[in-house]
Image (tube, grey):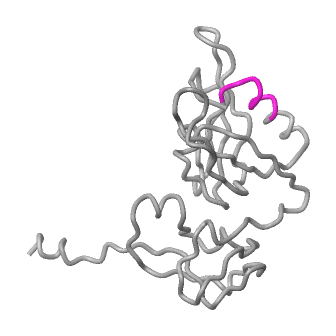
């Protein structure tokens, strides 16, 4: 009975779909979004689909979407920054950007390691920063053959922009997804490695 129940159980997961047909240029509101249970390939689920309708509020539709159709990352662009928020983009190895699986609406801590060997130190540069967009880049970054992505983060102040610029230009940067957590990473977590 247990084996039969496991084999016949519904393993589908809710993903965001259009409640009605969406036109190119349309700015999304919560009333135009809903969820539907479905089974997606793991890579598509991680990189292209959305689980939370609120993460798409304010995004602009860049490709027509039919009623009931799955909304994918390629169908939308993130909405405008919140009042007082600026944006900054930088390239990073996908291995240091949660495997290249970030979506608009995710939040990340930005960690940077400065120095090498026994003198290396890791600092939390930004905490709980919103991801505005992620664009896949070339298939190689430097000579190690790793993929690269360009990540755009929302910043609340000039001080944050300066700190992120310093980290990207002088340190090894790693992004830690903290979406849904009550607290991000702590500063001074010890030496580590990454790639900016």
Residue 20, image x, y percentages: 63, 91
Question: Where on the picture, by quarter, is residue 169?
Answer: top right
Residue nearest the observer in this picture, 137 or 124: 137
**The N terminus is located in which quarter?**
bottom left
SS majority, magenta: helix
Residue 68 sits above or below residue 108 on the image: below
Question: Where on the picture, by quarter, is residue 176?
Answer: top right
Q: Is residue 79 left or right of residue 1?
A: right
Q: Is residue 126 left or right of residue 96?
A: right
Residue nearest the observer in this picture, 13 or 49: 49
Q: What residue is shown at x 83% (from left), y 40% (from top)?
A: 160
Magenta segment includes 128: no
**The C terminus is located in which quarter?**
top right
Residue 164 sits above or below residue 41 on the image: above
Q: What residue is shown at x 24% (from left), y 76% (from top)?
A: 9
Residue 132, image x, y percentages: 73, 57
Residue 48, image x, y percentages: 54, 64
Question: How many marks on residues?
Answer: 0
Residue 12, image x, y percentages: 36, 74
Magenta segment includes 170: yes
Residue 119 sits above or below residue 152 on the image: above
| Span highlighted in magenta in the image | 165-172
Residue pushed farthest top? 118
Q: Is residue 77 left or right of residue 72?
A: right
Q: What residue is shown at x 58% (from left), y 10% (from top)?
A: 117
Q: What residue is shown at x 61% (from left), y 66% (from top)?
A: 73
Q: Is residue 161 left or right of residue 140?
A: right
């Amino acid at each position: 009975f247990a084996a039969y129940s496991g084999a016949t159980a519904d393993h589908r997961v809710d993903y965001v779909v259009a409640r009605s047909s969406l036109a190119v240029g349309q700015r999304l509101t919560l009333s135009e979004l809903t969820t539907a249970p479905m089974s997606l390939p793991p890579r598509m689920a991680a990189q292209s689909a959305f689980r939370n309708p609120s993460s798409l509020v304010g995004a602009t539709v860049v490709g027509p979407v039919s009623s009931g159709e799955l909304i994918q990352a390629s169908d939308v662009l993130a909405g405008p920054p919140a009042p007082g928020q600026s944006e900054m983009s930088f390239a990073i190895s996908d291995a240091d950007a949660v495997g290249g699986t970030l979506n608009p609406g995710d939040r990340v801590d930005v960690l940077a390691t400065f120095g090498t060997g026994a003198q290396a130190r890791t600092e939390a540069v930004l905490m709980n920063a919103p991801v505005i967009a992620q664009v896949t880049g070339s298939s190689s970054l430097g000579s190690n053959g790793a993929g690269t992505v360009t990540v755009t983060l929302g910043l609340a102040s000039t001080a944050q922009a300066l700190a992120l610029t310093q980290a990207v230009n002088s340190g090894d940067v790693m992004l830690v997804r903290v979406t849904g957590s009550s607290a991000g990473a702590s500063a001074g977590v010890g030496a580590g490695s990454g790639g900016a």
